[in-house]
Amino acid sequence: MTADAAFARKLFSGPCEFVAGAMSLDALPETGLPEVAFVGRSNAGKSSLINALTGRTSLARVSHTPGRTRQINLFRLRDALVLADLPGYGFSRISKAEAAHWDSLITGYLHTRRTLRCVVLLLDARRGIMTSDKEAMTLLDEAAVSHQLVLTKTDALKAAELQRVTAEVQTVVSQHPAALAAIIVTSARSSFGIAELRQSLAELASH
């Protein structure tokens, strides 16, 4: 079930403010609001998607260099929903110590964040689903966190290739109990699928 389209549009076009950036769980403030986290491989398009959802161009920092998001960034939509931009995974050009810190931060967040309602797991459609994505889904299963798979950058694929990638992802989704059955196909550049994702997330908001 998804929220009313008018409510979703109003929610995501309304006030959206940066709450905090935290490099440790202790530094994360409690907002008391339902929270949706965005996670994916480095450079999968998390910041671009968040900007597209909120109708902004620079709410979340967009970088062409993987690994730039190094903390959990929280954004509050009205007083109804919090969006959490998590560090990307699968980026090899960082130190082992930094990678271990990121893994610990994300794992701790998923297991202990009481207000977390859903994770939006982004997959770059050009690359399909990779081993690190499957590992992330297993982690989410173990934490019993519902996750919505979203294909990004789909404007770069022809229809037949997109259909093939979507079918491949759907097969993997069926193997993970905490994954939501439907896959949302998006393009931040063309806004394709953005309204659908807004409605899905708005259903989790505090009315």
Image (spheres, grey):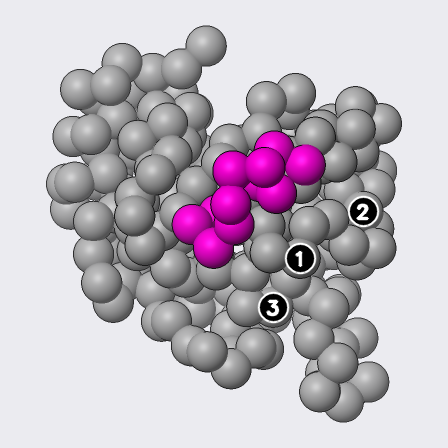
Provide residue 88's location: percent of width, then percent of height.
61, 65
- Seen as rendered, the residue at the extreme top is 1
Q: Position of residue 86 (x, y in %)?
A: 55, 60
Query: Upstream in the sequence, badge 1 or badge 3?
Result: 3
User: In front: mark 1 or mark 3?
Assistant: 1
Q: Residues within 10 Å of mark 3 (few under 14, many from 20)?
A: many
Across and down, in percent, residue 95 comes to 76, 89
**Separation of disc 1 and disc 2 at Cα?**
13 Å
The circle on residue 134 is 2
Q: Amino acid at mark 2?
A: Lys
User: Neighbour class for label 1 at 10 Å: few (<14), some, many (≥20)?
Assistant: few
Q: Secondary structure at mark 2?
A: helix
Q: Secondary structure at mark 3?
A: loop
Q: Any magenta on residue 120?
A: no
Q: In the image, residue 198 lies at what x, y percent?
A: 34, 32
Q: Work out whether mark 2 precedes mark 3 in sequence or the reverse, and give the earlier one.
A: 3
Evaluate whether residue 128 shows in this view: yes
Q: Amino acid at mark 1?
A: Arg
